[in-house]
Amino acid sequence: MTGYIDWLRAQAGPALLPLAYVTAIVRDAEGRVLFQRRADFGDAWWGLPGGLFEPGETPEDCLRREVLEETGLRVEPHRLTGLYSSLRYRVSYPNGDQAQQVTLCYACRVAGGELRAQADEVSELRYFAPEALPPRPVW
């Protein structure tokens, strides 16, 4: 998340901002769901691949870009599963930045690529069975 978010934070500092995100539900052949452990939150939780919209992107373009960057997989969104936002979805990042997430979540199919974690942002990728999901944040 550089470029746009760096510019935005230079204007607003760490203040609470409503920000638009996308997340991907990516399943393997056994129906397990792909989760990632973010490097900046350490062992605190696992989350779905995705990220922040940049100016000029559609939700689907943002989703494809973020999933490829974070996981090495090329995906195609095939269904919007929900739009999520709540005052409970307030995130305080380790650097002090705050965001209220407004998230579009898509079920996706893998169209190619090779699973690999993005070194600077993602410390681990792993598939989990739906009945045994890892610890994750409320948002």
Image (cartoon, helix red, strand yellow):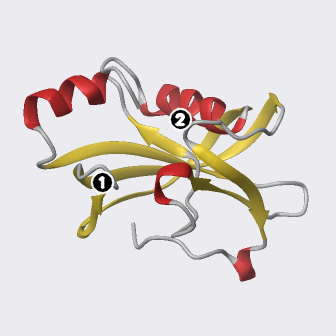
Q: Residue 51, how many percent across, how many down?
A: 45, 41
Residue lying at 47% horizontally and 51% vertically, measured from the top left: 40
Type of the residue with mark 2:
Leu
Q: Height in image: 73 above or below 43?
A: above
Is residue 5 rendered to the left or right of residue 77? left
Give the residue at the far bottom of this rendering: 131
Residue lying at 29% horizontally and 30% vertically, measured from the top left: 5
Q: Height in image: 46 above or below 24?
A: below
Q: Residue 92, how many percent across, how many down?
A: 28, 60
Q: Residue 104, how many percent across, how many down?
A: 42, 49
Q: If the image is split into quadrants, where does the N terminus sit?
A: top left
CA distance separating discs 2 and 1: 15 Å
Residue lying at 72% horizontally and 74% vertically, measured from the top left: 130
Q: Provide the residue designation for mark 2.
A: 63
Q: Earlier in the sequence, mark 2 or mark 1?
A: 2
Q: Which mark is residue 89?
A: none
Q: Quadrant of residue 139?
A: bottom left
Secondary structure of residue under mark 2: helix
Type of the residue with mark 1:
Gln
Secondary structure of residue under mark 1: strand
Q: Quadrant of residue 115?
A: top right
> How packed is label 2: few (under 14 Cα within 10 Å), some, or many (20 or more)?
many
Q: Residue 103, how many percent across, how many down?
A: 38, 51
How many numbered discs, if any? 2
Front position in the image: 8 or 61: 8
Residue lying at 76% horizontally and 55% vertically, measured from the top left: 27
Q: Provide the residue designation for mark 1.
A: 101
